[in-house]
Amino acid sequence: MKKTLLVPVDFTPVSHEALLFACELSKNHETEIVAVHLLDDKIAGQFNAGKNPALKKMAERMYEEIMAKTKKDLDNFLSGLQEIYGNIIHPLIAHGTIYEAFNDVASKYDSSLIIMGTHGIVGMQNVFGSIAYKVVVRTPYPFLIVQEKAFKPINTIYLVFKDVNQMINNADVINTFTGYFPGKYIFNILSGNNVINTVIPPSLKEISDRITLVQEPLLSKNAIDCAAAAGADAIGLCIDEMENINGETYGITQEKILANKFKIPVLCLPVKASL
């Protein structure tokens, strides 16, 4: 299978929006989409009936019924988009928790980007934090986080880097998904000397004419407001749990960037690029 876009599916409208984003991005860059629904490992463990043959057989049948229903629900959830976009969407049922399973699935299916829907920070998430953020920080793959909002093409991405080294360290990762986003890139490098004349890394040479380097320290504004002022359709940043504690670097915590008031998509780059 060629490189894929991986989309977690939980049958909610926001996961449908994430699938729609993946389908639209596939128009720009030929790809396959893996729509994965996770079943917790505990479900399989509950049907381990030990050595009793009768109980074991009954447990296996119950587990098969759960799998069959889940497969049917997933197929039904995908059917409308498959009718429009064709057979580029591949359903997958995997086992594991939402915080751990994506590494294995992304690696197995050679995913260049994980597209995930989020409700933002609502209800008890205001106390315990964003689920989407907790998933992102545990996965060394780039994410595109979207909220429940009508699809809009991404023409300009506003990427914020702490310094030139952070940009250079993530250049290869950025290169893996530039084909999906054929528009402009604004790289705001917050600190360093002679930033405007920084040499674009070799892996990004092919899109160098689409990259604008700026240096806009976020003293009185935050990253989201700067992105909006620049007319960007998406914002990008390197996810680092230490940076989420005080919110000083971006003028706002990283969780709140993911759940931003403009509901624009957020590209999340791993601090330690692994692709």
Image: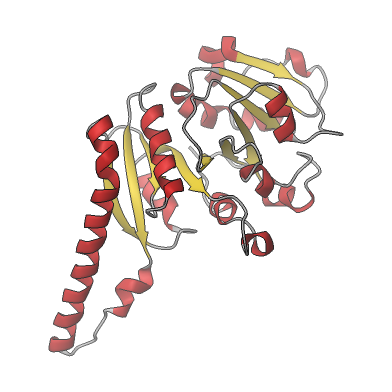
Residue depicted at 61% across the width and 55% down the height? 130
- Check the image and report above or below for 242 versus 84: below
- Nearest the eye: 64 or 263: 263
> Could you tell me residue 3's position as x and y percent?
35, 33
Residue depicted at 32% across the width and 57% down the height? 94
Quarter-of-image position of residue 71? bottom left
> Could you tell me residue 2's position as x and y percent?
30, 32
User: In the image as oriented, which residue stretches furthest toward the bottom?
Assistant: 52
Residue depicted at 66% across the width and 41% down the height? 261
Quarter-of-image position of residue 180? top left
Viewed as shown, does residue 176 lie left or right of 41? right
Viewed as shown, does residue 186 lie left or right of 192? left
- Check the image and report above or below for 256 versus 193: below
Quarter-of-image position of residue 19? top left
Residue depicted at 58% across the width and 9% down the height? 209
Count up the numbered dots.
0
Q: How is the image coloured?
A: secondary structure
- Check the image and report above or below for 213 versus 69: above
User: In the image as oriented, which residue stretches furthest toward the right?
Assistant: 220
Is residue 201 visible in this depiction of the protein?
no
User: In the image as oriented, which residue stretches furthest toward the front?
Assistant: 150
Q: Could you tell me which quadrant the N terminus lies in?
A: top left
- Nearest the eye: 137 or 153: 153
> Could you tell me residue 186's position as x and y percent?
65, 21
- Nearest the eye: 155 or 103: 155
Is residue 52 visible in this depiction of the protein?
yes
> Could you tell me residue 54's position as x and y percent?
13, 88
